[in-house]
Amino acid sequence: MALIGRNIFFGYELKEILSGLSFENSQGEYIGITGNNGSGKTTLSLVLAGVKKIWSGTLELDGISPFIDDDYFNFRHRIGYVFQNPEDGFVASQINREIAFGAENAAFPSCEIENRVRHLMDLFGFESHCGCSSLELSGGMKARLAIASAVALGADYLILDEPEAFLDYCGKKSLSSAINEIAEKTGIIHITQNPDILSRCERKLLLKNGILKKIDGSNLISKVLGPEIETNPTDETVLAFENVYFDYMNINVFSGISFALKKGEVVGLVGASGEGKSTAALLSLGILKPKTGRIFRSGRAGLAMQFPERQLFANSLWEDVLYGPSSLGISDPQKHCKNALILLGLSEEMWKKSPFELSDGQQRRAGIAGVLAIEPDILILDEPFASLDYIGRENIFTIVRELVDRKISIIIITHETDLLSKFAPRLIALQAGKIAYDGPTDNLLNNNDLCDRLGIAPLRN
């Protein structure tokens, strides 16, 4: 059995994205697909899933085409799909119902559905969240849920569109375990920017100029940012949490946390999914208010959100980035807008486009550009590396270096601890409503036992 595409052409309006592309994935084969932001990886995944109808060419799964009405259901039933933004695939109000939905829709026996749900709830760490709403979860936990729901379908083929982008250390291990469980009988197509995941794929493909090219992956895996960014913070405090308590929907998030951020300092905020990292960011900006305790902030603060599409709203990329400096009365807002767009590597041909026409990686850059354009004194980056290609990550590195030279204070929230070791000399780790670690980055990331207890990835050898 095989999923086969031949001479596929596809695009949007008059712009061609896939240019005579051919592809084959056999059942039991694990394929990795990588490529630059905007190269068409998500578009390709939707074509292979039968969601997008191709201009020309053929796509078949064992002779079944998704473009023939009578065959569409049979084709889609055999393919599981995990969206880049996990919420895009949610349909149920509770976690256990979400995992069960696909199998129920495929009319599996109830006892089999119950067994699958129970197993996947355990595998992905949802035992204590059974009755919770999927929308109440953190970004990382939502990604876990999306993967569990796709695996529960028991499809012959599984298409993963960078689900690891928001997964924590434990979530990535759960994903690896799930893939190992189904690998013998399932064809897996994994779109990824992660060199570790790519290295584990049996076949590695690069999408460039609308076609797929086989690669060995070593040139991508060997790329490492460096040298480390050097900081020289002043003694001035620009942000401080003083014995902060916070509850969310009667669930305790913080139980008296305290820390301070100095002018020109770069700090990494780490911890397992659901430990309150994004909540700390929203508290820092005053979007959320503490139950008790005090938060001090000096100067203007900006947040690039975990899911960038949540902060994009205008008709064009230019209008979106221009909005902040214009509304705040910053002098020459057009100049600040242009500089931010150029710094993020967003070419002038994109400026008139709707931000929602951009790829996820490009949207992430757009979100960061909108924040940089307001000249913040404090910049908070929530999962800035998710979905970014190597060039995008280099841009972030360049931006942080420039901002550090200007004595901007930066908090980076990420599960990419290898990258944090290049950016942040200091780490703050959250666990069970407390600050479990606050100190030098190397001391934490070189302590495998402590990292394991905190649910974060240690440095690779």
Image: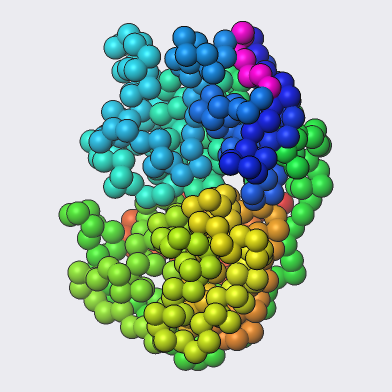
The reply to whether the magenta stretch includes residue 62 is: yes
Q: Is residue 419 left or right of residue 206?
A: left
In this figure, what is the number of numbered marks? 0
Residue 452 appears anywhere in the view: no
Give above or below for 307 relative to 241.
above
Residue 388 screen position, x and y as percent: 61, 54
Colouring scheme applied when the structure was drawn: rainbow
From this viewpoint, which residue is outermost toward the left? Answer: 250
Residue 32 screen position, x and y as percent: 68, 34
The reply to whether the magenta stretch includes residue 137 is: no
Q: In this orientation, which residue lies closer to the viewer: 78 or 264?
A: 78
- SS assignment for the magenta stretch, majority: strand
Q: Is residue 377 left or right of residue 128?
A: right
Report the span colored magenta.
57-63
Give above or below for 150 relative to 230.
above
Residue at image point 50% right, 11% down? 71
Residue 216 appears anywhere in the view: yes
Q: Is residue 146 left or right of residue 283?
A: right
Q: In this orientation, which residue lies closer to the viewer: 205 or 325?
A: 325
Residue 259 screen position, x and y as percent: 40, 76
Residue at image point 46% right, 44% down? 85
Image quadrant where residue 459 sits: bottom right
Q: Is residue 137 left or right of residue 81?
A: left
- Quarter that holds the N terminus: top right
From this viewpoint, which residue is outermost toward the front? Answer: 14
Image quadrant where residue 284 sits: bottom left
Give above or below for 160 relative to 302.
above
Residue at image point 73% right, 34% down? 19
Residue at image point 49% right, 89% down? 331
Q: In this orientation, which residue lies closer to the viewer: 248 or 260?
A: 248
Residue 385 screen position, x and y as percent: 58, 57
